[in-house]
Image (cartoon, grey):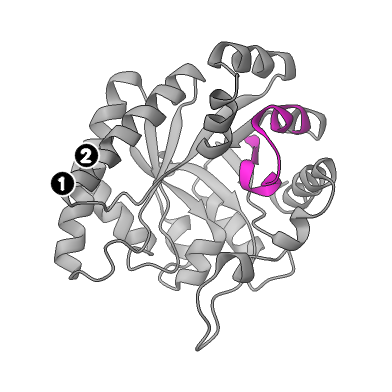
């Protein structure tokens, strides 16, 4: 088991500070956001310098989160998606990061189920092929407020693709709020298809309420509607012993001291998983 600080949890910070905070608060990994990484590189940073900092703080980059809107399918938009995939894979190679997260948002929701699946299958296969020569794996995150929101749907597409570098991240909030997946389904999974776990709380949108993650996820662990203990038990039942990352997408908590946020993430997760 490896514990990895999630860049979302310390949203208002930079890539360098995240390494130090992760190290000082007990983490041995960092799940970095590309926007934080690219901003560092665009303002004088380098991969070599960042690798030196990773070594200094004994923190690995466990995942780059994320390549978004993977359902882009119009010719120019799809070409841009594949360019982004190559860029993020190069970053993963430079940082010796084994996993990149990929996710669809609402770009396909207006299409039929068959059309959505055909596009997703084509795109995730193409993305998998970009990463394969570099040993990069891709964890699919199904997103609660989209039509692509169930674990089984992702597993079905992975099987159809025939690619051996596609898996999923078990994100407690997305699976709970999407309503299409139960902990029992996770417990029956092949652990080899779990590339990461996002430990988090929150609630689904209420009837008539617009989906807004900054509202429905603004909860510390134990404050929302997610049965965290059940999801933890389900993951453990598979025998999974990989990366666990606490994802605190919480504007209220983001206003705390960054060090305190990270330490609370570490302590809150350890209450449940050990």
Residue 104 among magenta residues? no
The answer for how far apart the CA atoms under marks 1 and 2 are is 6 Å
Q: Is 204 left, or right, of 252 in this rendering?
A: left
Q: Position of residue 271 (x, y in %)?
A: 78, 52
The secondary element bearing badge 2 is classed as helix
The outermost residue toward the front is 43
The outermost residue toward the bottom is 208
Within 10 angstroms of label 1, few (less than 14), some, or many (20 or more) residues? few
Q: Position of residue 124 (x, y in %)?
A: 26, 44
Q: Position of residue 272 (x, y in %)?
A: 72, 54
| Quarter residue 42 falls in | top right
Q: Is 25 left, or right, of 163 in this rendering?
A: right
Residue name at image x 73 percent, y 19 percent: 57
Residue 274 or residue 270, whichever sits in front? 270
Numbered tag placed on residue 166 in the rendering: none
| Quarter residue 241 falls in | top right
**Image vertical order of residue 183 relative to residue 99, above or below:** below
Chain part drawn in magenta: 1-21
Can residue 262 be seen from the camera position used here?
A: yes
Q: Position of residue 98 (x, y in %)?
A: 46, 27
Q: Which residue is mark 1?
A: 75
Numbered tag placed on residue 79 in the rendering: 2
**Image vertical order of residue 52 relative to residue 133, above or below:** above
Residue 8 among magenta residues? yes
Q: Is 83 left, or right, of 96 in this rendering?
A: left
User: How many numbered discs sit on the rendered protein?
Assistant: 2
Residue name at image x 61 percent, y 55 percent: 232
The secondary element bearing badge 1 is classed as helix
Quadrant (top left, top right, bottom left, bottom right) of the N terminus: top right
Residue name at image x 69 percent, y 27 percent: 16
Q: Is 102 left, or right, of 107 in this rendering?
A: right
């Amino acid at each position: 088991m490896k514990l990895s600080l999630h860049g979302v949890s310390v949203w208002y910070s930079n890539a360098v500070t995240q390494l130090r905070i992760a190290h000082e608060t007990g983490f041995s990994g960092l799940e970095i956001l590309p926007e934080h990484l690219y901003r560092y590189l665009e303002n004088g940073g380098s991969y070599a310098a960042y690798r030196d900092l990773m070594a200094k703080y004994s923190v690995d980059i466990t995942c780059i989160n994320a390549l978004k809107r993977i359902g882009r399918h119009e010719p120019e938009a799809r070409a841009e998606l594949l360019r982004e995939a190559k860029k993020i894979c190069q970053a993963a190679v430079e940082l010796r990061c084994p996993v990149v997260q990929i996710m669809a948002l609402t770009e396909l929701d207006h299409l039929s189920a068959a059309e959505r699946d055909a596009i997703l299958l084509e795109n995730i296969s193409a993305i998998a092929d970009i990463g394969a020569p570099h040993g990069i794996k891709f964890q699919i995150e199904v997103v609660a407020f989209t039509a692509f929101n169930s674990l089984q749907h992702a597993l079905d597409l992975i099987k159809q693709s025939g690619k051996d570098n596609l898996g999923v991240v078990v994100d407690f909030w997305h699976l709970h709020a999407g309503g299409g997946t139960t902990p029992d389904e996770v417990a029956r999974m092949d652990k080899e298809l779990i590339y990461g776990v996002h430990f988090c709380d929150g609630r689904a949108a209420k009837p008539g309420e617009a989906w807004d993650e900054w509202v429905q996820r603004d909860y510390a662990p134990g404050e929302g509607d997610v049965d965290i203990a059940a999801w933890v038990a389900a993951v453990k039942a598979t025998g999974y012993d990989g990366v666990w990352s606490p994802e605190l997408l919480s504007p209220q908590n983001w206003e705390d001291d960054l060090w305190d946020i990270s330490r609370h993430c570490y302590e809150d997760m350890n209450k449940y998983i050990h």
